[in-house]
Amino acid sequence: MPLRLYNTRTRRVEEFVPLRDGAVRIYVCGLTPSAQAHLGHARSFLFFDVLRRYLAHRGFAVTYVQNVTDIDDRSIRTAAETGGDYHEIVRGYYAEFTDAMQRLGVKAFDYEPYATEFIVPIQTMIRELVESGHAYVTADGVYYRVSTFANYGKLANRNIADLEAGARIEVDENKEDPLDFALWKFAKPGEPRWPFPPYGDGRPGWHIECSAMSRELLDREGLGFDIHGGGADLIFPHHENEIAQSEPLMQKPPMANFWVHGGLLLFDNRKMSKSLGNFEPLTDIVRRYDPQAIRWLFLQTGYRKVMNFTEESIAAARTGLENIKTAYKRATEHSETAPQDPGFDAQMEAALDDDMNTAAALAVLYEYAAKPRPSFEGMRYWLTILGIEPDATWLEEPQIAPDDDFTARLQAALQLGNEFDGVAPADAIERVMAMRAQARAAKVWALSDRLRDALAQCGIELHDTKGGTTWTVV
């Protein structure tokens, strides 16, 4: 049975057939790191991580691109308000996001393009749109002329009249029509800028970035790529605008054969919002809960459905995951005698071929794990496809904040040759090293770094080798 996916472009579940034999090209709209990421972002990226793993299982050579919008109004405004640099703001938030993705087991992207590194391709695309009559220049920027694209609104399944009724023009915009959108924003005093003759210095609009980067990395021929993904909240206007500005310049539309969108995430039946007081940064959540349990929770719900995150649901997910891991460990005890089970593989494929029905796949896993002799290798393989590391254990991270006295107490004990928490100095070092080893095994990188730094401040230098970790006094 072939893989079937829901295609937002056609609004039906369709058989997935790659545009090029044996190869799949995917572009997913990534983070705009001008503020802290939240769990809703993680849900979308975790799904696409599983999809690319499964496509690789199906034998496809997958090229996966997830961009970084590293220039936008909010980061510029924050820099102006704080006197900082927008680069530093973006770098800080994106470092938090990257750490969270590592904890959640998301595979590294094949390409991770930053918008500011693709200014020339962006400008090339804007110039082509102006020269073909799809864009025009005003006093404050270059705008896309929506009236020139007959299919505008089809992705979102909305007609032009309805869209115009809800559109508005900002005070500083000089566009012809409320639906028109900025491709290039001329720089105001103090703003970052790039030269763009003959139009004027400025910076790219949000929508054109993704069109230019996906064209440059996946579709220079203008024949389209396989899958464009993102959260459902991006369908309009972002993805609608990408299509409008990309397809007039293509040899053979559509821009993407499949448009795949993940559902929204609620917290206690409410949308996460700082104004509602229920916003928690992703970087905090992946420390407070087992990241693999978070992934397991997401797998329990169809990727297109609205999902509700509660303390009860994450606790239940962790219990379910632990049950599977217990069965997996039991299977390792008779791994040499457990037979391979092609029927198990077929059931897992049948579940995931059905529009990536991960909930059905988990049901198959639970049933298979309950058998007297499940295949150790089979369980490990399919857990890995789902992004679960069956041998990993979660280390509940000790709260060693910068203002705690952990480092000071350790330093004082080692310098004076006194006991630290009831053990001799050398044993204290070994204890901290053991905590760090646990953190590294569980991929709790921030804690691992803090423990290394604590020892370094005490004059203890660690040396990581293939044979283990040793220490010396410096």
Image (spheres, grey):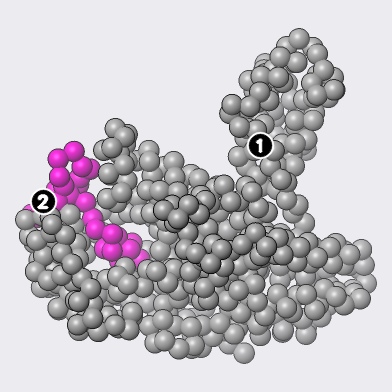
- Helix, strand or loop at label 1? It is loop
Q: Is residue 286 above or below residue 267?
A: above
CB atoms of marks 2 and 1 within 8 Å? no
Other-residue count near label 2 (Cα within 10 Å), few / some / many at <14 / 14–19 / ≥20: some
Q: Magenta span covers which residues?
A: 186-214
- Helix, strand or loop at label 2? It is loop
Give the x, y percent position of residue 337: 93, 72
Specify the amino acid type for callout 1: Gln
Q: Residue 399 got which mark?
A: 1
Give the x, y percent position of residue 101: 55, 54
- For the residues labelled 2 and 1, the Cα–Cα distance comes to 51 Å
220 to the left or right of 282 = left
Residue 189 highlighted magenta (yes or no): yes
287 to the left or right of 68 = right
Residue 391 highlighted magenta (yes or no): no
Give the x, y percent position of residue 150: 20, 84
